[in-house]
Amino acid sequence: MAVAFSCLSWNVENFGTNSRDNKGNLKPQFRDKVERVALEIKKHNPDVFALFEVRSKDVFSEFMDHFSGYAFHITEGEQAQETLLGIRGNFSSFVTQRLEFKSGNAMLRPGVLLTIVLDGIKYVMLFLHLKSMNSPVGWGLRDDMFGKIRNLKKAINRAAGGPEHAHFIVSGDYNTMGMNYSYGNLDIDPEEEISRLKKLMSAGTYQMKLLSKNSAYTYFNGSYSGLKGNLDHVLASSHLKFTQFDGCDLNIVGLTDHPHPSAEQDQWIHDYSDHGIVYFEVLKV
């Protein structure tokens, strides 16, 4: 089957923090990181890409210089961390900001909803950066956001004429880190949270699957502390098919290209991010 389009999503950890010096000029080290990140994205030549934890409008303006032929969108609001979306210019596309994914909290990130039309077929993509906490509060906010994904899928199903015609993909940093319940035995480990998400999204009319990946982890914050997690995911309508990478739907690259743990991996984290790149290719329906 032919590829309809490719997509890359990546949490580029605090991207753009302290981008300017005390005179208001862009720092050389900031420009260097922008170039490194841009070159890493260009290796995969994605039709669509989303970057999370963008903390400066300077990233937006600098990226436009590296990606001619792309249209860009960046989220806006009181939140400190933004989502930057790039879409190849020859695509028919429509972008909206979904505020319901802030769950009533001004500082949480909104979702970004992208609809692209290829050969008369609509593909709807939602890019999310969910709450990062393993406390009951963090767990509850993620659960609320998962409910909003289900509600959105039902609306897309109705508009498309049924789930079998609703081509829906949700990509991003889900922060599936489980829940640590203080002074009790109600802890939920990360794998249990992921398993619960699979069941929630596959049931009834939702008919969505959590895509398989060729790495057991997508996050590692360095050998000095050793924290590792499977945080970045893609949900997709069950009928959609994807190019296979080592027998998996998602290709996790960058962070996982180096031995774990190693000095080389620590250097990659320093140069780029503590999250791996998520890359996938959607096959034509």
Image (cartoon, rainbow, N blue to C red):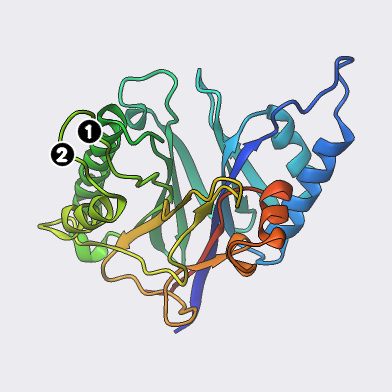
Q: Where is residue 72 in the image (x, y as percent from the top left)?
A: 63, 42
* Quadrant the C terminus occupies: bottom left
Question: Which circle's residue, 1 or 2, is located before the other in the chain?
Answer: 1
Mark 2 neighbour density, 10 Å: few (under 14) some (14–19) many (20 or more): few
Secondary structure beneath label 1: loop
Along the viewing direction, whichever of 130 and 68 lies nearer the viewer? 130
Q: Which residue is drawn at 71% across and 66% down?
A: 43
Along the viewing direction, whichever of 188 and 122 lies nearer the viewer? 188
Q: Where is residue 113 in the image (x, y as percent from the top left)?
A: 42, 43
Secondary structure beneath label 2: loop
| Residue indicated by mark 1 | 181
Q: Where is residue 31 in the image (x, y as percent from the top left)?
A: 83, 39
Residue 32 appears left or right of 112: right
| Residue indicated by mark 2 | 186
Q: Which residue is drawn at 66% across and 51% down?
A: 269
Are the residues tagged 1 and 2 within 8 Å (C-beta)? Answer: yes
Mark 1 neighbour density, 10 Å: few (under 14) some (14–19) many (20 or more): some
Residue type beneath disc 2: Leu
Q: Residue furthest left?
A: 204
Residue type beneath disc 1: Tyr
| Quarter occupied by residue 263 | bottom right
* Quadrant the N terminus occupies: bottom left
Residue 72 appears left or right of 135: right
Q: Residue at x 54, y 52 (%)?
A: 220
* In the rendered image, the vertical position of residue 130 relative to residue 99, given as above or below: below
| Marks 1 and 2, how far apart at CA | 6 Å
| Quarter occupied by residue 29 | top right
Q: Where is residue 268 in the image (x, y as percent from the top left)?
A: 70, 55
Tell me if residue 68 can be seen: no
Residue 85 appears left or right of 146: right
* In the rendered image, the vertical position of residue 249 relative to residue 150, given as above or below: below
Tell me if residue 207 can be seen: yes
